[in-house]
């Protein structure tokens, strides 16, 4: 094993090990239930069968294929499989970007581990992790097209067509293609004396980029819902409650230590863009600017910045160091055969260490303990056994688990499918949960008879005052029934 291959293997192994952790989040559950429903019924979900408030309502979700992959993984390997699903998706994203960057291996190893530390804040077992992987693949496909010209453009619409059946993050792919097109346009009109560095070695004309981008946008329609899916990303980001109350859609809290690597990476990128003897291209500047803006707008986009900014940071850090450090020639070296053996031994030792670290996230017991910390498993088990009469009022944070564990006995009142509920139902839920004036009418309108809530939720106290009785209680959750 050569030194270059060793560094690549060790760096990507480190990233895989970072990503292999308990990755089941609140929204994992409804994706598993949806995938199960699709497999059992042999058709795509087009109307909601899981909620009280949107029962039978049209539901167009692009992630049907990801949901099938997730549930098949879970049925085969359990919780460990979902954690591996997440880790391999992360690995795919970084591995393809690695192939898109030319720099000394140790330098790439440093920047890529930093990128992983930045991106790791929002890795979880949901379809969005496949968007992360495909972002890396598209970065590679764009790089390949610049090298080979129009013959490689066909990869773009193929990737976008697949993406549109895996997750609504296909909008990220269209954004990257749009940046490529705008940058090429700016390159073509910028006077030579003001021009930034053009895309190195590009063999793409503006017309070819435009054609590839147009074909890719059209490829979004190659999904069960047709061209209507083009509007899906806009619908999602237009939901006001999303930005106001859902943490991952809010601006990052930089007092949190896990978000600090993003700031380090952003600052390093800006510093070395300024110091680099290689003038930045329009594409590099626009990419950093757009994805930094998106990261500041919503914390969930921090992970994307950690991936897409890597080629820019690595390229300009390398150019700066090359100009600062003197060239070294000669020097004693070990025989090539000995070096390869030592590299292989080191790699095997690191694999063993990574395997030891991976024991915990592959353990069923460890996963169950983590799930019980964030999910009212015991309270839900009580509901399954006692079966008090519904309909059910549930906390938003637990709606996804209600779908997974209690359907069809109980329907969720609200859950993580914000694209389905929209502001209409989400605002009504907030009014109810906070026990704002008029909450009694909402209870009456939906004929709510049983509740699964946090003990300290404002509505819990009001329901008790109204005569509801406690059927089950623990420090995490309370089950109430109408008196």
Image (cartoon, helix red, strand yellow):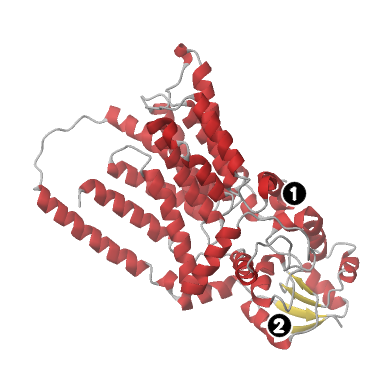
Question: Badge 1 local density, few (<14 within 10 Å), some, or many (20+)?
Answer: some
Which of the pair 229/32 is nearer the observer?
229
- Residue 276 falls in which quadrant of the image? top left
x and y, in percent, of residue 155 in the image = 47, 41
Q: Residue at x 74, y 49 (%)?
A: 240
- CA gap between label 2 and label 1 equals 33 Å
Q: Is residue 122 visible?
A: no
List the residue tagged with mark 2: 383
Instruction: Say which element carries label 2.
Output: helix
List the residue tagged with mark 1: 240
Q: Where is 423 relative to 220, above or below?
A: below
Q: Residue at x 78, y 79 (%)?
A: 480
Q: Where is 262 relative to 49, above or below?
A: above
Q: Disc count in the image?
A: 2
For the residues labelled 2 and 1, say whether their Cβ atoms are less than 8 Å apart: no
Q: Residue at x 49, y 26 (%)?
A: 282
Q: What label does residue 317 carry, if any?
A: none
Instruction: Say which element carries label 1.
Output: helix
- Residue 432 falls in which quadrant of the image? bottom right
Q: Residue at x 63, y 45 (%)?
A: 221
């Amino acid at each position: 094993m050569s030194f270059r291959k060793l560094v690549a293997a060790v760096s990507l192994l480190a990233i895989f090990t970072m990503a292999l952790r308990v990755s089941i989040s609140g929204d994992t559950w409804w994706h598993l239930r949806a995938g199960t429903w699709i497999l059992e019924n042999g058709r795509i979900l087009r109307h909601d069968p899981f909620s009280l408030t949107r029962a039978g309502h049209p539901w167009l979700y692009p992630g049907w294929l990801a949901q099938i992959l997730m549930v098949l993984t879970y049925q085969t390997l359990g919780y460990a499989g979902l954690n591996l699903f997440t880790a391999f998706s992360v690995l795919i994203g970084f591995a393809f970007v690695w192939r898109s960057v030319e720099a000394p291996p140790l330098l790439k190893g440093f920047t890529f581990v930093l990128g992983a530390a930045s991106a790791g804040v929002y890795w979880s077992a949901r379809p969005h992790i496949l968007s992360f992987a495909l972002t890396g693949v598209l970065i590679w496909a764009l790089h390949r097209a610049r090298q080979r010209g129009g013959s490689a453009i066909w990869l773009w619409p193929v990737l976008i067509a697949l993406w549109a059946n895996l997750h609504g993050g296909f909008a990220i792919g269209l954004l990257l293609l749009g940046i490529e097109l705008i940058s090429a346009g700016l390159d073509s009109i910028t006077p030579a004396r003001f021009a930034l560095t053009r895309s190195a070695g590009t063999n793409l004309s503006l017309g070819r980029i435009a054609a590839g981008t147009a074909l890719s946008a059209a490829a979004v329609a190659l999904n069960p819902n047709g061209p209507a899916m083009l509007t899906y990303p806009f619908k999602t980001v237009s939901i006001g409650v999303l930005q106001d109350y859902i943490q991952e859609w809010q601006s990052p809290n930089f007092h949190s230590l896990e978000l600090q690597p993003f700031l380090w990476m952003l600052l390093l990128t800006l510093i070395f863009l300024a110091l680099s003897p290689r003038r930045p291209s329009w594409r590099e500047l626009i990419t950093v600017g757009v994805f930094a803006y998106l990261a500041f707008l919503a914390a969930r986009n921090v992970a994307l910045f950690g991936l897409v900014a890597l080629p820019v940071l690595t390229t300009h850090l390398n150019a700066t160091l090359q100009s600062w450090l003197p060239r070294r020639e000669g020097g004693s070296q070990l025989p090539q055969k000995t070096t390869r053996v030592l590299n292989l031994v080191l790699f095997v030792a690191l694999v063993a260490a990574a395997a030891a670290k991976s024991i915990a996230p592959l353990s069923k017991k460890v996963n169950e303990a983590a799930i019980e910390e964030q999910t009212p498993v015991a309270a839900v088990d009580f509901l399954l056994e006692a079966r008090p009469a519904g309909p059910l009022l549930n906390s938003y944070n637990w709606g996804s688990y209600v779908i997974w564990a209690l359907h069809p006995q109980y329907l969720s009142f609200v859950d993580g499918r914000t694209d389905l509920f929209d502001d209409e139902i989400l605002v009504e839920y907030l009014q109810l949960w906070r026990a704002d004036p008029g909450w009694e009418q909402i209870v009456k309108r939906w004929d709510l008879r049983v509740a699964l809530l946090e003990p300290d939720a404002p509505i819990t106290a009001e329901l008790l005052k109204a005569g509801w009785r406690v059927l089950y209680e623990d420090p995490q959750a309370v089950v109430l029934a109408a008196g």
